[in-house]
Amino acid sequence: MKTTPLLNTLLVFFALGLIDTAGAPAARPPNIILFIADDHGQDAGCYGNKIIQTPNLDRLASEGTRYTRAFCTTASCSASRSVILSGLHNHANGQYGHQHSFHHFYTFNSVKSLPVILAENGYRTGRIGKFHVQPEEVYKFQSILGGNPGGARNPVSMAEKCVEFIRNTNAPFFLYFCTADPHRSGDRRKDNPHQPDAFGNGRRYEGVQEVAYDPKQILVPPWLPDTPECRAELAEYYQSVSRVDQGLGRLIEVLKQTGQYDRTIILYTSDNGAAFPGSKTTLYEPGMRLPLVVRSPFAKRRGGTCDAMVSWVDLTPTILDFAGVKEVLAPPLIAGNPEVAAARKQPPARYTFHGRSFAVTLEQEKPAGWTEVFASHTFHEITMYYPMRVIRTERYKLILNLAHPLPFPFASDLYDSTTWRAALKSGRGVYGQRRIEDFIHRPRYEFYDLETDPHEIRNLAGHPEHQPVFKELSERLKEFQKRTRDPWMVKYEYE
């Protein structure tokens, strides 16, 4: 059957239950919550980890859809959040790296962000917890919630602070709920000042029942070294994840108590992978393959999985789809920060995103046409220049390391982790399954067959028998850069 844009839109609304059987639009759009954990990889019961305790996320997955192949586009906090809230790769939106302190990266002021668009379409918008993008006027929320005990490391008290915002029924709401767990902490434990507080543990959080883990029982993934130091840090990380899960549980209780649960679509995910070397700040699988659970009260299918390959540029278009926003009109995106008056002289046109809505995949296990994603990382901290561009298909991954003559730069907290320091001290020269030398010094291209090499150890870029696929993916990656106006396209010409 040949489809039209109008028919596609109607199919989306039928799939979400936003059009009744008589064909009339629903009385009001749904509430939407975007729950973002900080540095949470696919470490949850619903993703197969039998040790970690995440009962609330597991229950949400049993009522919704669990995406098995969901990816961030850049494994860095600020840059990833800018992609989540703009639907644009960070090489195009200008948020190349961290927003805070001397890092000082800024999103271009001509970007049209998710909360601004939703507010223009009748939504009440609110945020709580970690923000980490700028300027605020580009990512403007109508309500900024907070002042809770424990701050963004206490998602239970964060949920309590959202009660009045959620209870208000004057208009549908969009809530951006962002924890600071399980991000690493640079503090010392309150209960033992001589011990590092790697993941915000060692203190009391009001309303939280801490879940401690025995390092001996931890599941050490193959990309990490199975050492006492790593097990101890993973146990701390697990504890922090369980705190996030309790916050999710309390937020769901608030929705139910206020009568909003069956009017609210919830999306749970993370900005990037776990804060360990080999994951965060890299575009290897642990850094970019993340949890994504979507629970829609309007969906008929419950507890299913979906293997569509989706990425964080798809989140803004999907949420707008859920909200019934069919088209966004705005002046065109301008690289740089022109004067606002000059920008307004540009006539409004249909605003385009790099991603697309995956709403139609919610009730499908194996939807057609979702077989590749792209990634683009440039900075983490200002001192960490290492641009990488990636195409990832169902079987292969090609990484272009644009600054390959440089040693791979480390985030300060990852380099200081006891896991990494112990690997260096051991003298074995190996970290997980990868040689430390290969981790630090990378070639221009890394090309992996994930079917036979899921841990990305054997680089096939120079293998003659793999050249046809390598060349095809290289061209597709270059075309992606061109299509998304990647400033680093000049590297093809001048280097």
Image (tube, rainbow, N blue to C red):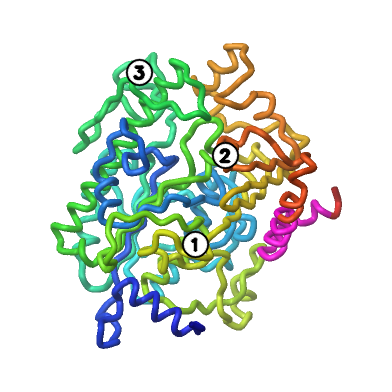
Of mark 3 and mark 1, the one earlier in the sequence is 3
The residues tagged by marks 3 and 2 sit, at their Cα atoms, a distance apart of 27 Å
**What amino acid type is highlighted by mark number 3?**
Lys
- Up-down relation of residue 185 to residue 452 (above or below): above
Residue shown at the point (55%, 58%) measured from the top left: 371
What type of secondary structure mainly makes up the magenta span? helix
Q: Which residue is mark 3?
A: 216
Name the quadrant containing residue 354: bottom right
**What amino acid type is highlighted by mark number 2?**
Thr
Closest to the camera, between mark 3 and mark 2, is: 3
The residues tagged by marks 1 and 2 sit, at their Cα atoms, a distance apart of 21 Å
- Up-down relation of residue 384 to residue 345 (above or below): above
Q: Which residue is mark 1?
A: 314
The residues tagged by marks 3 and 1 sit, at their Cα atoms, a distance apart of 39 Å
Question: Extreme left residue here?
Answer: 257
Q: Which residue is mark 2?
A: 281
- Up-down relation of residue 27 to residue 373 (above or below): below
Residue shown at the point (64%, 75%) measured from the top left: 342
Residue 243 in the image: x percent, y percent?
A: 29, 37
Of 381 and 325, which appears nearest the observer? 325
Which structural element holds mark 2?
loop
Residue shown at the point (54%, 22%) measured from the top left: 420
**What amino acid type is highlighted by mark number 1?**
Asp
